[in-house]
Amino acid sequence: MATIASRFRLWAAAGALLAGLSGCSEQQAGPQAGPQMPPPGVGVVTLSSERLELTDTLPARVSAYRTAEIRPQVSGIILQRFFSEGATVKAGDKLYQIDPTLYEAELASAKANLAVAEANAYTARLKAKRFKELARKSAISAQEVDDSDALAKQAAAQVKAAQAAVRAAQINLGYTKITAPISGVIGRSTITEGALVSAQQATALTIIRQLSPVYVDIKRPAASLLQMKNPELSRDVRVALDDGTQFGETGKLQFADVSVDEGTGTINLRALFQNDAAALLPGMFVRAEVPSTLIDDAILVPQQAVVRQATGQTMAWVVGDDNKAQMRNIVVTRAIGNQWLLQSGLQAGERVVISGIQKLQQARTRDPIAVTPEEAKR
């Protein structure tokens, strides 16, 4: 029994010694522990709501403001062409000369016929006047007076017909000089000197197009027409060329068609551009930015703040009033410049992280993470 008791005392003493050594070790280790790391610094942006006008990018074609197809109004041989193809012409400029010889002769003949008619009318008026004087003396019958009056009126009508023939001959002679009906850029000539042309022929001699201003015809889905009728919506239209180059001028919407294309379900919008440099040419394909919707309280989120998950979800790190960041599911719809239009998940006044996101991602936790936020510029 004495041996067992002595062993027990020995174990107790050893335990007390180990406890003492452990305490000393803890006391020595305490002062040597390193300082805690400060919260990571992140850049944040405070969200705000604003009135936003959305635009749609739609296919469009350029068309001339005015187009004139030049056709002869009388037949004859082309004697001369007075313009250079591709040049700018003004309304009234002479373009072609048709051989006027035949039409000059027709005018001379019409004038001669007019002189004869006027002479006959003069004789008829004198005769009718004399017959009226004789009738008052009962020297002739009333029938003879009536006949003389009728002949005088018939002669006066023949004068008017001759005058009309002279006017027609003058017009036809004038048509031998083909002039520009509008100002614009003239295209290539389809005929040369010496060619025979016919009145109102199907083939145009050339075409003049007015390029300043020009129209841009835009195809838009008919379903969006009601949104465009908002009177507060802007009428400004911008276009980009086929290679993506932005056209410098801003156009104005003029009108929308009142019928829908049955094949495509679209309506035609027309915008007017001044096109001072003639950079937009008829037939050119462009992409038009057209006002579509007005949102009174839109929230735009910087693209740097939006994190896309492998599942396709979009998320953002949101910093609360306690300066702790936590991931939150959000829904964005479309890009507006370097920002996303928010549909849901955030509110105006909340702060989202736009820089330092990698530090937060490395934490690999869904719990709030203390951060040191610093307001950043968008």
Image (spheres, rainbow, N blue to C red):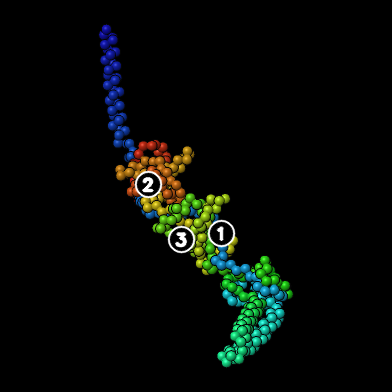
In the image, 270 versus 278, the foreground residue is: 270
Identify the residue position indicated by label 2 in the image: 352
Ranked by sequence position, the earlier of labels 2 and 3 is 3
Q: Nearer the viewer, mark 1 or mark 2?
A: 1
The residue drawn where x is 54% and y is 57% is 60
Give the residue at x 62% y 70%. Answer: 186
Residue 220: numbered disc: none
Q: Is residue 210 above or below residue 140?
A: above
Q: How far is the residue under mark 2 from the one under mark 3?
A: 33 Å
The answer to which of 363 and 189 lies nearer the viewer is 189
Identify the residue under disc 1: 61
Q: Which of the pair 285/49 is nearer the observer?
A: 285
Asked where in the image residue 364 lies, by quadrant, the reply is: top left
- Image check: 271 left or right of 346? right
The kind of residue tagged 3 is: Asp
Q: Amino acid at mark 1?
A: Arg
Q: Is residue 368 visible?
A: yes
Residue 261 percent across, percent down from the top left = 55, 53
**Mark 3 falls on what kind of element?**
strand
Q: Residue at x 66, y 68 (%)?
A: 204
* Dot 1 or dot 2, earlier in sequence: 1
For residue 236, the mark is: 3
What SS does tag 1 mark? strand
**How many neighbours does mark 1 have within 10 angstroms: few (below 14), some (14-19), or many (20 or more)?**
some
Position of 365 with respect to 138 (left or right) is: left
Name which of mark 1 and mark 3 comes first in the sequence: 1
Q: How many marks?
A: 3
Q: Is residue 117 above or below residue 286?
A: below
Looking at the image, is 225 positioned above or below residue 199? above
Q: CA distance from mark 1 to mark 2?
A: 42 Å
